[in-house]
Amino acid sequence: MRYYSLEGGRPLSGEIVVQGAKNSVLPILAASILSGETCRIQHCPRLSDVDTTVEILRHLGCRVRWEGDALLVDASCVTRWDIPDSLMRRMRSSVIFLGAILSRCGQAEISYPGGCELGPRPIDLHLAALRALGADVRERGGSISCSGGNMQGTEIVLSLPSVGATENAILAACGAKGTTVISNAAREPEICDLQEFLCAMGADVRGAGSSTVVVEGRRVLHGCDHRVIADRIVAATYLAAAAGVGGHICLQQVTPGHLSTVTTALMQAGCRIHCSGDEISLESSGKLRSVAPVRTSPYPGFPTDAQAVLMAALCRSRGTTVFVENMFENRYRHVSELRRMGADVRPEGRVAVVCGVEQLHGAQVNATDLRGGAALVVAGLQAQGTTRIGDIHHIRRGYADIVGDLTQLGAAIRDDT
Ligand code: EPZ
């Protein structure tokens, strides 16, 4: 098994450019099949989820190749409209292909993505949006068959601002005749990035970033060139890492406004943070204070994906911090691993209470999911002695080079194969 090994206690310093956003590039790659030409997607992070997405694109008939940090997708000959179960199981978020395949091919066949480490991941809102557009959606056992060659623009009201359902609705609406209005849409920056990509292809999508997105469908879409936004959760992870162990770092090519709830919490904890243009710098003594209750919520609230890494940064803080995880049922799986390192965290349903301890100690731990694994890295950087993290495949789904990035910032971390 592959491990990350960390020697804790070394403050971080220096600067790094933050990778492109996983949760932006995945829907954008799905959207690239709407064009009959080649799209160049720059600042694409090398992640296992991106590798899986490339396999899906190639399965559908696209020609895909890397050129430096750009992925070139030639979707001129999409010949299939199904995603094999093996690929669906490898990446739950492959459900975001549904709307794009339906738009391009008039039909789509996927298997039900099923649950994941964070708990059940229903897709009822995705399917309701497709049905509202007039698609015929049949669920049989573990598979979903959609036909929608004659989708009509309509009003879609999402009962909750689901990121994936908003993306699927936008992509399906691109293939519908007339105007579609999506209300209670998710407002995440990744939705704005998807809108920018679609408009660069010639689509007419407006309102992303607000709760109402409007799509004029059936445009002929062409190839385009697009640079993916920075990954705000990777940025939050590195800020949390420096906050927890101490030091002075500068993140470059980021959008500070995309993680303002995280930087606000870190300032409350005693960090000095300065944002200017596309840079965020953070200074920390490594001895943090507890902060006001952290309640995760849809953007622009505190991001659920940053909950675990902030928790890890606060494990040695003075005082007690309460976390309330409102987005997923099972997003405290990293707590048991943090406790093996001496953390005093008590989960109770959606609440977890973090009581700061004097010291964390190195231990053998295992990543439980993507962001839970990143939290163990944040804790290992603080711990006395050596921490070995197993099951790092979870981490590699979302971090292109967490070892290289943190090494560049002075951490003693290596990838033990
Ligand atoms: C996206 O997942 C992100 N993934 C997640 O990031 C992120 O945690 C989540 O949004 C929330 O911000 C990608 O973008 C690839 P949702 P998604 O639909 O779209 C419920 C990471 O670590 N729901 O906004 O699946 C759902 O159960 C990952 O990078 C329904 O009930 O999230 C959840 O409780 C983890 N029915 C809530 O909505 C539906 O049809 C929010 O889910 C869809 C969702």
Image: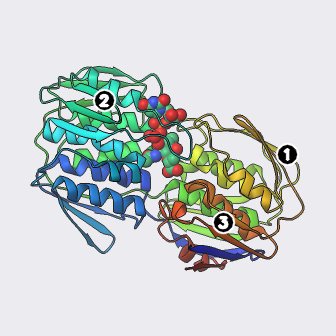
| In this picture, residue 390 sits left or right of residue 68 | right
The residue lying toward the viewer, choosing from 148 and 245, is 148
Callout 1 touching callout 2 (CB < 8 Å): no
Q: Amino acid at mark 1?
A: Thr
Q: Is residue 333 above or below residue 121?
A: below
Name the residue carrying label 3.
Answer: 377
Q: Is residue 308 above or below residue 183?
A: below
Mark 1 residue element = strand
CA gap, disc 1 to disc 2?
48 Å
CA gap, disc 3 to disc 1?
21 Å
Q: Position of residue 226 (x, y in %)?
A: 28, 58
CA gap, disc 2 to disc 3?
41 Å
Residue at the spot 9% in from the left edge and 54% down from the top edge: 77
Look at the image and tell me in which quarter the N terminus lies.
bottom right
Q: Position of residue 90 (x, y in %)?
A: 40, 54
Q: Amino acid at mark 3?
A: Val
Mark 2 residue element = strand
Look at the image and tell me in which quarter the C terminus lies.
bottom right
Occupied quadrant, residue 39: bottom left
Name the residue carrying label 2.
Answer: 140
Name the residue carrying label 1.
Answer: 320
Rendering colour mode: rainbow
Pick whichever of labels 3 and 1 is earlier in the sequence.
1
Residue at the spot 21% in from the left edge and 25% down from the top edge: 135
The residue lying toward the viewer, choosing from 311 and 330, is 330
Callout 3 touching callout 1 (CB < 8 Å): no
Comparing labels 3 and 1, the label whose residue is closer to the camera: 3
Q: Position of residue 101 (x, y in %)?
A: 21, 42
Callout 2 touching callout 3 (CB < 8 Å): no
Q: Is residue 408 above or below residue 242?
A: below
Comparing labels 2 and 3, the label whose residue is closer to the camera: 2
Q: Residues within 10 Å of mark 2 (few under 14, many from 20)?
A: few
